[in-house]
Image (cartoon, rainbow, N blue to C red):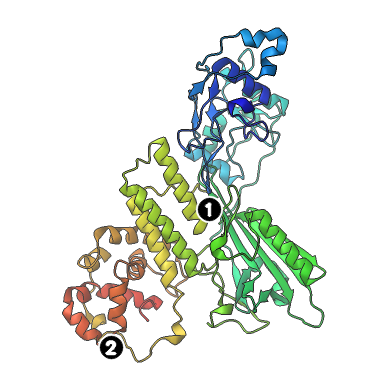
Amino acid sequence: LELNGYPTVKTGVNTTLLELAADGIVFGATGHCEVCKDDRKPLLLSGEGYRCTGFVNEYLKCSFKTQTPPRTAWQLTEVAKAASGGYLKKLKLKTGDRLFASELGEVDAESGVVMQHHGGTFVESISKATTCIVTTQEVAEQEPEHDDVETAKEFNVPGVEDTFLTDSVEKGDIQDMIPYLLWGEARKRKRKIEETVSSRFIEKDGVSMDADVGELASKAHVLVDMATKTVYSEMMNRTDLVTGINSFYTLHLLESDSTASPQYWVFRKWGRIGVSQGGTKVEECSTKDKAIANFRKLYEEKTGNAFGIKKDDFEVKKGKFIRVDMQHKVFSGGKKAKTGEASEGGGGGDQPLGQLSKAQIEKGDAVLDKIDAVLNEGVDPKSPAGNARYLALSAEFYSVIPHNFGMNKPPTISTADMVGAERALLQFYLRMGFEDMDQADTSLTPISGVMELPLPKSLEESAKTVCAAKDIKACDKKAVGLAKKQAGKPNEKMEASQYGAILLYTANAIYKDLNKCLRDEDSGAYLRGNAPFGEELASTFQRATRLGASS
């Protein structure tokens, strides 16, 4: 195996080393993946084809599969040549195509959604943890037994007819497995997972912490080292568009408010963003040093990085969580809850894992620049290699900027409209809540007469003379989702057009000029010199003021 470039430990597939060697001897050594081009990872036999076990980038495992991999003649070691009386040495080893019982298939989206809502997922290899095998009566009755059927029976994994999935999709709920059994015993049904809007956070001493710390919130706070400006609170995230993973991991080191007899706890929480699935754990530590050591150990286990290194030195490790930089008021000088008091509202509005820092949002914007560059190259998202590039960059973006997809699989960002919608969201995060409203210049007042201007019928009509049509379209598209969730929790219900106005205001498309217009003491003269700009954006000003966007 080593001579032919095959792994001998941790192959990443369910096929045994003996089976891999036999396949290579008969059909030839498999070549490398045409998608990720990882020359250290040959395509390996797995089920009904050959699968890549490499990574497209640090954020995405390659999912390329084929039944006709490139091959070269298998090379034999001297020991193998001498084995069995030199039998293998006498063979004329050459390449050929292996025949499979069926073609490679894909799991349909509806089936995937139903399975995920009940705590399940689809896998490509069989293990003792597998719930069931979905197949047909014909495959189940094959003689000799199909390899996957044989493996499933060895692991006591039941087989069910493919109508088990179609009926579950049609009825919107996982059906009882018994009527569909082809072999084995039916497994117990998993409970349906409930979706949530976002995690809840509270703020104490200028640091946000997860509300699930429970009663500890009333007697403890997140440890902060003011000398080194270190906050012992970390948010980690990982999104994989191949498996549909969209997971978070929260870590807090809590110190008791009482200094007379200090106590320390390490709190952790994990799960999928936007669903009730997951868990929490609190460990009490006898000393501060032991608590810090435990915190550091957990952080390094999850990220592969040492805690406390410079932000720019963080290295994304394949298959590990990435660090998400959060905004804390403890070092900003802004308003924060008094010492010893916990208050609601540390969650960053519509941001599912709390308020992201400006630097983190800028990282997300940089990833969108990469996707823009791929789009400008004209890369086809339908080609295997092109799809992999978009998948990898989308996984990177969603890891850097956490999203709440509930149990749905994260969508691939592969169009200019999708990039525009995500840029609008980032600008919404960046502008709403990051400006210190307590320091606003009270000498500046709203532009005289702007509220009396006639209200245009749509955002497109109001802004078409100052913005590109694609920017308006992107804001309109993103606004629909924000309006549905009533992002930012406005005092009055807001329509999609109102959210669109704010997105357009905060977007780079007009922000520089609009901000100058609103804050310039001679704003009236500015508007008069740009009459179309002022008149057409009257509705934007009027609606944005309701959320304080133009304060």
Check the image and report above or below for 226 versus 253: below
Q: Which mark is residue 406?
A: 1
Q: Position of residue 24 (x, y in %)?
A: 58, 20
Q: In this rendering, does residue 139 appear at all? A: yes
Identify the residue shown where x is 49% and y is 50%: 395
**Which amino acid lies under the numbered mark 2 shown in the image of this protein?**
Glu
| Count of marks placed on residues | 2
Q: Secondary structure at mark 2?
A: loop
Q: Quadrant of residue 346?
A: bottom right
Which label sits in the foreground, 1 or 2? 2
Q: Position of residue 409 (x, y in %)?
A: 50, 46
**Along the line of sight, which residue is nearer the eye, 433 or 119?**
433
Q: Is residue 336 left or right of residue 520?
A: right
Q: Secondary structure at mark 1?
A: loop
Q: Quadrant of residue 354?
A: bottom right
Q: Residues within 10 Å of mark 1 (few under 14, many from 20)?
A: many
**Along the line of sight, which residue is nearer the eye, 24 or 387?**
24
Q: In this rendering, does residue 183 appear at all? A: no
Structural distance between the alpha carbons of marks 1 and 2:
46 Å
Residue annotated with mark 2:
521
Q: Position of residue 452 (x, y in %)?
A: 23, 81
Q: Are marks 1 and 2 in contact (CB under 8 Å)?
A: no
Considering every residue shown, the one lying at the far front of the view is 78
Identify the residue shown where x is 67% and y is 67%: 252
**Which amino acid lies under the numbered mark 1 shown in the image of this protein?**
Gly
